[in-house]
Amino acid sequence: MSTYKELVRVLEGFAEMSRTRSLTLGEALDTLDEAAYGFIALIIALPFLQPVPLGPFTVVGGLAFAALGWQMWHGHESPVLPKKLRDFAMSEKSWRILVNVCLRIVSFGRKFTKPRYGFLVSDENSSRVGSLILMTAGLLMAIPFGVLPFNNVLPALAIVFYCFGQLEEDGLMVLIGYFWLVVTIIYFGLFFFALWYFGSAAVVHWLT
């Protein structure tokens, strides 16, 4: 079975399980058993592909990605998520909306993926590259920026493209993931610089 069909089956299964009660993210992901890091990270990253900040959930999600990257770097076969993220529950309606959005994004992404640049997605290289992307993007996402636009979507793009690259054995998608990671670092860096610059100017103006 292709990765796409497997992902569709899993996402639809999440919505079906939520019909009788609120379903936590941990319960949903437990159905994946020892699925690949890329598969789990992709599912978690999809809800963050929106410009609206998700508040504390963005911080928790970012720390979860950083934890996944840390575990991948140290060679853990089965990833473990933080308890707060595992306990995050959503209703059937929320799962249905999330599943529909996820399927559209994944279907769109598949139009551009194919096996290429295999040296970037070999077991050893993919593990190192993936762990760096997950840890860096996750830590940036976890910074509590409040109402800063795109503080979740830019790191999520880096993670999603890496995951597409790993799951579809597409090295080009991994490179695009790195591109979005660089964009994220620059974007956050400019924000910090502006915060420091205008903050310093305000202090000087106040003192004088």
Image: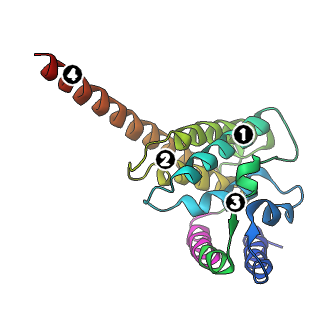
Q: Nearer the viewer, residue 88 or 61?
A: 88
Q: What stretch is highlighted in magenta?
A: 99-113
Q: Residue at x 87, y 47 (%)?
A: 78
Residue under label 1: 67
**How far apart in space, not on screen, are marks 4 and 1 (Cα)?**
38 Å
User: What's under tag 2, amino acid-wise?
Assistant: Trp
Q: What element carries label 3?
A: loop
Q: What residue type is labelled 4?
A: Val
**Mark 4 or 3, nearer chain start:** 3
- Visible in this render: residue 50? yes
Disc marking residue 88: 3
| Image quadrant containing the N terminus | bottom right
Q: Where is residue 125 in the image (x, y as percent from the top left)?
A: 73, 38
Q: Residue furthest left?
A: 208
Which circle's residue, 4 or 2, is located before the other in the chain? 2
* Residue 146 x, y percent position in the rendering: 43, 47
